[in-house]
Image (spheres, rainbow, N blue to C red):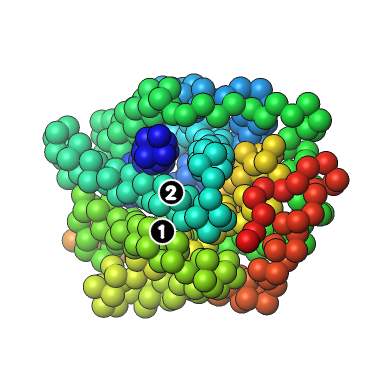
Amino acid sequence: MQRKVSFLLAGMMFLEYAAWGAWMAILSGTLNDRGFAPTQIGVIISAFWMGCLLSPFLGGQLVDRVMSSQLFLSISHAMCAIAAFAMAYQTSATGLTVLMLVWSLLFAPSLGITNSIAFRQIDKLGGTEAVRERAFSVIRTAGTIGWIAAAGVLYIFNILLHTPKGAVTGPIPELLLTGIFNLAMAVFSFFLPDTPPMKDQRADPLAFRKAFRLFKEVPGFAVFMWISFFAATEFMFFYNLSPQFLISLKIPYTLVPITKAISQVAEVGALAILLPLWLPKKGMKWCLLVGSFAWPLRYLIFAIAHPVWLVVLSLGLHGFGYAFVLVVQQLYVDRVSPGDIRASAQSLLTIMTLGVGNVIGALLSGIVQQHYTHVVMVHGVKTPVTDWAPVFILPAATTLICALAYMFTFQDSDIAAFQHKPLGGTSAPGVPLK
């Protein structure tokens, strides 16, 4: 039974992140090739992060209080598939922006809900905190593998569709593939273990309201969330700009998703091996610092942009940082959250980082790239060229400041002290530390 549950949870994570990774790694490059301006691309991509800002609390509230989590996933992904297929045939920036917002409003809640499903099902299997977090790391690794697989499937998908190199017309392949993964997730969700809403009649009916109390009652929680927010504003300089940047380094367009998958390969190693090994021994702070300092180093290498092989290898630093920062953030929120609001608490993290932080980052990355882009004549053709060095200096400096902020403010002892105290005197938080 334990093996079956773990397999189903891993499959859930695989399809969840495959649906996201199918378009995230390359869409901005595709739109750039189709003549969209950097600021337009920034607005289109920011529509996804706007969905992460607006809808997660509604999804968290529904699964914490009203409906089973697996049913919500099935409905939301089925509707996502419709939006993705419609988006694939859009040719205007306005149409893409509107449909991207619709897709993300439906998809964004599932990011936190898949985490809460995994944590609740792992709870049922028992074990110590270390065993529990190791199990989550392994299950979450399947999501990263799904992202990698999506890049490979997209390459084959383009061959099957006979997509011409640098195609500027016709359906957008990565969005068609996204719709297919959404449909697969909608069906697969029916086979997930039952995760009903909490039945405690004493629980606050508005789970999201209780989640906000974490800012006041958990030591260091507010500072942690604000640092995480500022770090998230710089994510889009990687997600949004790296396809165009890699293409400028003469990496073929069709190989960009596979090249970027280096970051996910590093993430697999970090999630499946290093994080489960180091987290129980070193603690959350040490892991946060290792991951957060990897990001400014990556951006510094991007700014130098030479040699190309070093730039490509530095993609692994993104995956390393993702595992040691973003996944640790999810584990931290789970530790300090009462059981009846875990989905809403994870949604709060999604809103602060993937929502507000990345909306700002997507818009800012487009503006910064536009500022450092000028038109030159290449073989008699006017061609936009970006000066990438100053573009990447800004996120390098910001992520370095955030890493230093984690160093001086985050304390494992604050988590340990709070674990044994109730939140607002209503319920005990999570699973206590050893």
At label 2, counting other C-alpha atoms closer than 10 Å, the crowd grade (few under 14, some 14-19, many 20 or more) is many
**Residue in view at x 75 percent, y 63 percent:** 417
Foreground of the two, 215 or 274 = 274
Residue 148 image offset from top left, x and y in percent: 30, 49
Residue 255 image offset from top left, x and y in percent: 21, 53
**Residue in view at x 40 percent, y 66 percent:** 274
* Left or right: where 337 falls relative to 280: right
* Left or right: where 271 falls relative to 227: left
> Pointer 2: what residue?
140
At label 1, counting other C-alpha atoms closer than 10 Å, the crowd grade (few under 14, some 14-19, many 20 or more) is many
As helix, strand or loop, the secondary structure at mark 2 comes to helix
- Count numbered badges in the picture: 2
Question: Is residue 24 at least partly visible in the picture?
Answer: no
Amino acid tagged 2:
Arg
Residue 342 image offset from top left, x and y in percent: 64, 41
**Residue in view at x 63 percent, y 61 percent:** 434
**Residue in view at x 40 percent, y 25 percent:** 191
Q: Earlier in the sequence, mark 2 or mark 1?
A: 2
Amino acid tagged 1:
Leu
Q: Quadrant of residue 297?
A: bottom left
As helix, strand or loop, the secondary structure at mark 1 comes to helix
Mark 2 in CB contact with mark 1 (< 8 angstroms): yes
In this picture, is 203 found above or below 50? above
Foreground of the two, 414 or 368 = 414
Q: Quadrant of residue 184?
A: top left
Q: Which mark is residue 271?
A: 1
Foreground of the two, 88 or 433 = 433
Foreground of the two, 84 or 273 = 273
